Amino acid sequence: MTAGLVILDPRKRPRVPWANGRGMTRELIRDPDGKWRLSVADLEQDAPFSAFPGVDRLFILVAGRVRLTVGGRETELVAGDAARFRGEDAVDVALDRPARAVNLMSARGAIAVDSQRQPAARQIASPATPEEILVLASPGRTAAGVWIPAGAALITEHRSRGDGDQVEFMDPVCVHRLRMRRLDLTTS
């Protein structure tokens, strides 16, 4: 593993109920200013999502298959797929068997989120800054023998990494690279 890299393992986080009580989630990390949070939802039954007005959501399915209905429009997702929607949208999830998803919720107008799904690979560039997060959409064992489950996130403790820092895996893994960027809300 790359020095300074931190694994946020959902298996080591407590399960807490969704705001609407219809499911369970595990928070992985939260911005100190409360502008964004990353969590892992255990999808165990068909359910409506909690409403979060003024929040933009990025939903990354990391295990299973679901039918996500956003504002009356249904989309089928498989592990590795992502969807974006607004927190005030009416969203329902339907599933044939339990699934798991990572949710990034960010304050609209305060944070811009860039998301890039990277093809499955054995070498993944480590996060460059604390504003960058890698989300594993498939599980994998690192070259150092550390098992990382789907839904885990990798962050860096350092302000910037050296060029070429890589996380090496025994088998190819699929990741989503998330970058949070604060928007300048001041006016001249």
Image (cartoon, grey):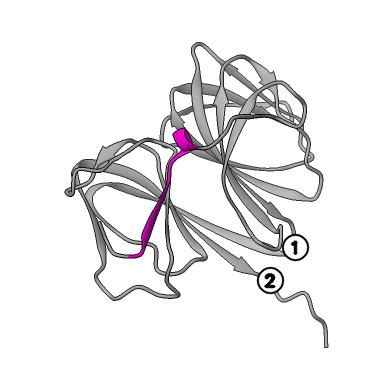
Q: Residue furthest bottom?
A: 188
Disc ID at residue 152:
none
Residue at x-position 22% and y-position 46%? 142
Q: Along the polypeptide, which appears first: circle 1 or circle 2?
A: 1
Q: Is residue 156 above or below residue 70?
A: below
| Residue 127, percent from left and from top | 39, 63
Residue at x-position 66% and y-position 23%? 23
Q: Quadrant of the C terminus?
A: bottom right
Instruction: Classify residue 111 by image quadrant.
Output: bottom right
Q: Quadrant of the N terminus?
A: bottom left
**In the image, 7: left or right of 102?**
left
**Mark 1 touches mark 2? (CB < 8 Å):** yes
Q: Residue furthest top?
A: 96
| Residue 42, percent from left and from top | 55, 26
Density class for disc 1 (Cα within 10 Å; few <14, some 14-19, many ≥20) is some
Disc ID at residue 183:
2
The amino acid type, in three-letter code, at marker 2 is: Leu
> How many numbered discs, if any?
2
Q: Nearer the viewer, residue 86 or 7?
A: 7
Density class for disc 2 (Cα within 10 Å; few <14, some 14-19, many ≥20) is few
Residue at x-position 49% and y-position 22%? 99
Q: Is residue 113 above or below residue 59?
A: below
Q: Which residues are magenta?
A: 4-12
Secondary element at image label 2: loop
Q: Which residue is mark 1?
A: 109
**In the image, 65: left or right of 15?**
left
**In the image, 62: left or right of 101?**
left
Secondary element at image label 1: loop
